[in-house]
Image: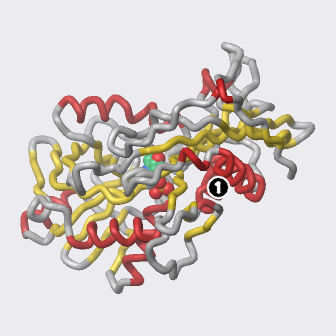
């Protein structure tokens, strides 16, 4: 497919933030974005790169009322050799299409998405940060655009990809977080939209997140909606527990987002000979393990943080301390290995890395 490219003029260009320590996350966006439209008679059409600009939407636009939307989150990395790399990006596009199916949005051609992403990154390559641990965060998004009220799938859609530099997740080192186990709110139910990356799931999570923050915890651990006893996810990450020598994560039961990082962790750990189980894990089993001293490490896994070690849980009126409160040995090893893969510092036995520039 031909992608039309309109470059930003000098007056439309923004200064590129260069200081990796002050980048933060999701606050800066590059000079261009990639777009495509959908109409029933034409399918997805008019793939193009344009100068970054505001969208003009009718106040009745469907996505603003009924949340028919899906998105993705991935990164481009400036490698040790000066090259630019993507990491398992086609897996993100496959998941985007699965989310589309759940939200009744027409699927996209993955080759076109890849081509659009490559063009955007080529045009805005100056925006990829070079400091250690920094990357270009990429946010593909689809929104329903019919300017009509009424609950039904939209006929028209807009797809776009915005990108922007993000800082290292741990500017002060690999620090474990404290998490709050929510017994009042749930994130998603099996049969609902929890396994799709769609706006409504995050709207549903805000109240619990705010409550956790107020109490001094940085993330929420979600339990299953039905029994409120099995662990599911932490914030916007999948979660792993090491109990003695078994690494446990929740199975993909329908209410859990199938993370790319989750899958990478499972495959890497298995390749190292670690026993990995995808099984239901009751929060009581976690408490028992902690009491017996067999809860060795806990960490979240997701694109933004890669690995987020956990030092403490709070559930009802109990506290669980994880290991000795410092980041665990397996967490550290996985974190370093995944970053080395992503930045092209080591061989890639899994074939996950794609050099695009
Ligand atoms: C995006 C996301 C994850 C992590 O997925 P990755 O592909 O590893 O980034 C986990 N849980 C939720 C709810 C998410 O939105």
Where disc 1 sits, the SS reads helix
Specify the quadrant of the image occupied by residue 9: top right
Quick check: can you spot residue 189?
no
The extreme right residue here reads: 41
Q: Is residue 27 visible?
A: yes
**Percent from the top left, x then y, of residue 310?**
22, 55
In the depicted structure, whether residue 80 falls above or below residue 108: below
On screen, residue 14 versus residue 159, left or right, reads: left
Quadrant of residue 86 within the rendered picture: bottom right
Task: Determine whether the beta carbon of the residue marked 1 sits less than 8 angstroms from the nearest atom of ligand 1.
Answer: no
Tell which of 336 and 240 is nearer to you: 336
Horizontal placement of 114 versus 21: left or right?
Answer: right
> Residue most toward the front?
10
Left/right of residue 14 with respect to residue 301 in the rendered view: right
In the figure, is residue 202 to the left or right of 208? right
Q: Quadrant of residue 335?
A: bottom left
Q: Nearer the viewer, residue 45 or 41?
A: 45
Residue 337: % across, % down: 37, 72
Question: The C terminus appears in which quarter of the rendering?
Answer: bottom right
Say which residue appears at 41% left-offset and 76% top-offset.
268
Q: Residue furthest bottom?
A: 273
**Residue in the picture at 29% in, 72% down:** 333
Q: Report the coloring of the rendering.
A: secondary structure
Q: Residue at x 64, y 23 (%)?
A: 54
Q: Looking at the picture, how far across and down is residue 187, in whole percent?
A: 40, 41
User: Could you say which is closer to the camera, residue 214 or residue 350?
Assistant: 350
Quick one: label 1, few (<14), some, or many (20+) residues within 10 Å?
many
Please count the marks in the image.
1
Residue corresponding to mark 1 = 93
Residue for point 43% across, 33% down: 204
Image location of residue 110, percent across then percent down: 73, 57
């Amino acid at each position: 497919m031909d992608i039309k490219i309109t470059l930003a003029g000098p007056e439309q260009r923004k200064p590129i933030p260069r200081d990796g320590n002050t980048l933060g996350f999701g606050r800066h966006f590059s000079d261009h974005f990639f777009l495509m439209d959908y109409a029933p008679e034409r399918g997805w059409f008019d793939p193009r790169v344009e100068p970054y600009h505001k969208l003009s939407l009718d106040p009745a636009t469907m996505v603003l009322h009924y949340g028919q939307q899906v998105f993705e989150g991935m990164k481009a990395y400036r490698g040790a050799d000066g090259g630019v790399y993507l990491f398992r990006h086609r897996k993100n596009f496959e998941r985007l299409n699965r989310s589309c199916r759940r939200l009744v949005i027409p699927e996209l051609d993955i080759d076109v998405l890849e081509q659009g992403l490559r063009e955007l990154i080529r045009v805005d390559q100056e925006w990829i940060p070079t400091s250690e641990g920094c990357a270009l965060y990429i946010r593909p998004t689809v929104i329903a655009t019919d300017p009509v009220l009424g609950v039904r799938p939209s006929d028209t859609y807009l797809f776009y990809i915005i990108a922007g530099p993000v800082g290292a997740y741990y500017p002060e080192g690999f620090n474990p977080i404290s998490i709050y186990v929510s017994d009042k709110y749930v994130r998603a139910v099996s049969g609902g939209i929890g396994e799709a990356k769609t706006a409504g799931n995050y709207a549903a999570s805000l109240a619990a997140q705010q409550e956790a923050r107020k109490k001094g915890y940085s993330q929420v651990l979600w339990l299953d909606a039905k029994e409120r006893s099995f662990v599911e996810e932490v914030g916007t990450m999948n979660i792993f527990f090491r109990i003695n020598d078994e690494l446990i994560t929740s199975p993909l039961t329908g209410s859990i987002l199938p993370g790319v990082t989750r899958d990478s962790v499972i495959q890497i750990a298995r390749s190292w000979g670690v026993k990995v189980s995808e099984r239901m894990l009751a929060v009581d089993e976690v408490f028992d393990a902690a009491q017996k001293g067999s809860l060795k490490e806990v960490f979240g896994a997701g694109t933004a943080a890669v690995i987020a070690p956990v030092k403490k849980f709070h559930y009802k009126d109990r506290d669980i301390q994880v290991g000795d409160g410092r980041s665990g040995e397996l967490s550290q090893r996985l974190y370093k290995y995944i970053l080395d893969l992503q930045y092209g510092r080591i061989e890639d036995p899994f074939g996950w890395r794609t050099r695009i520039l």
